[in-house]
Image (cartoon, rainbow, N blue to C red):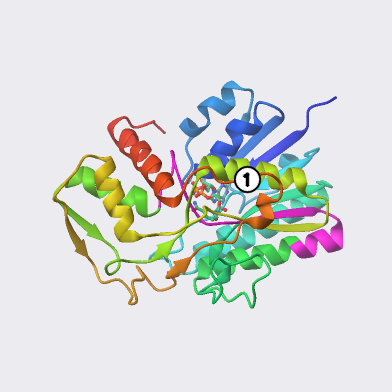
Amino acid sequence: MARSKIVITGGAGFIGSHLADALALESDLVVVDNLSAGKRANLTQATRAGATVVKRDLLRGDLGSIFRRADVVYHFAANPDVRLGRAGTKPSIDENVIVTHRVLEACRAAKVPQVVFPSTSTVYGEASVVPTPEDYGPLEPISVYGATKLASEALLSAYAHTFGISAVIFRLANVVGARSGHGVVVDLVRKLARDPKRLEIIGSDPGTAKSYVHVDDVVAGIRAGVQATTGPVAVYNIGSEDAITVRSIADAICHELGLSDVAYAWTGGAGGGRGWAGDVRVMQLAIERLERTGWRPRRTSEEAVRAAARDAWSSIRKPSGP
Ligand SMILES: NC(=O)c1ccc[n+]([C@@H]2O[C@H](COP(=O)([O-])OP(=O)(O)OC[C@H]3O[C@@H](n4cnc5c(N)ncnc54)[C@H](O)[C@@H]3O)[C@@H](O)[C@H]2O)c1
């Protein structure tokens, strides 16, 4: 049987590159990334297994040739920051909504049968049901990032029902692990590398309480969900089976790095334990729908955080290159 052609946008980034490692072994894999946050070094293993890397900005130019003859497109390119930067809302709208629309248009023109999309727990906003199931509503994001991912989900649904491109959507909890360039674990480990005695923590004690899931569990979950899906649109949550506060994350990281007597300096954040405006206070996802495929997360939130802290620490000691 001919090998399938798979395209991963944003495949040089954190989650996309782990997916590339898995998919390069069994498909003709093309990774498209503008390398704004992603790194070629993340794709060492995938390129050794035969993956091709195309450096392209998905916001510009004609994307037709990239998706020609693709069987599945994993659209992972995005601006994943929940916190708004100095540039305001425009980067999130451009890199999440506009890029998703451009990718879907190119997939429609190239007659790509399936698109897989990493959405986020933030589409639920401050949900009143926790753990939150996929059919929870109304979906009321409190961050612009969450809004852009929900808008992208809506576009995927419309393209599935209008143009017959099947859509598999995964709403991910906070993902941690090797090659991550953002998020609380990386932030705290970097700060401890600079000053092992005093740790600035964004928010107020004990901070938010959220589910953290290891990237290996995410890749396994995505593969299980894609394999199990037949309908035009499927939505699956992926998370761990519990949640952890920011204080417990800081404690676990200090313990993992062998540091004691670290003074925590809380910044105060945006109130109610939130780090910033748009930061959800409590998040845990109901994962029974995906578990029915046979998948289960292998790590708890704390185990995921500890493993990620070890990886972040060793990459600070031994940087991986561009
Ligand atoms: N990390 C998480 O906790 C998390 C949680 C939920 C959803 N997600 C989603 O998963 C996906 C991957 O996130 P990540 O954490 O790996 O982020 P990441 O920043 O490591 O990866 C995103 C990649 O997209 C690339 N990219 C961005 N804009 C591009 C453009 N215009 N053209 C081409 N490439 C572009 C970047 O260079 C980067 O390699 C994103 O869609 C994100 O929204 C992540």
> Does mark 1's beta carbon lie closer than 8 Å to ligand 1?
no
Query: Residue shown at 27%/70% (left/top)?
Result: 204
Say what amino acid the circle numbered 1 marks: Gly
Q: Nearer the viewer, residue 180 or 60?
A: 180
- The correct choice, above or below, for 2 with respect to 15 in the image is above
- Please identify the quarter of the rendering in which residue 155 is found: bottom right
Counting the numbered discs, the total is: 1
Q: Position of residue 121 (x, y in %)?
A: 55, 63
Instruction: Residue at 73%, 60% (x, y): give it.
Output: 156
Span shown in magenta: 157-182
- Residue 232 in the image: state x and y as whole percent: 82, 57
User: In this view of the protein, can residue 31 be seen by the observer?
Assistant: yes
Which quarter of the image is occupied by the N terminus? top right
User: Where residue 229 sits in the image (x, y, percent)?
Assistant: 78, 49
Label 1 crowd bin: few (<14), some (14–19), many (20+), radius 10 Å: many
Quarter of the image where one finds residue 74: top right
- Tell me where residue 26 appears, x and y as whole percent: 70, 27
In the structure shown, which secondary structural element does the residue marked by tag 1 occupy? helix
Per the image, the residue denoted by label 1 is 221
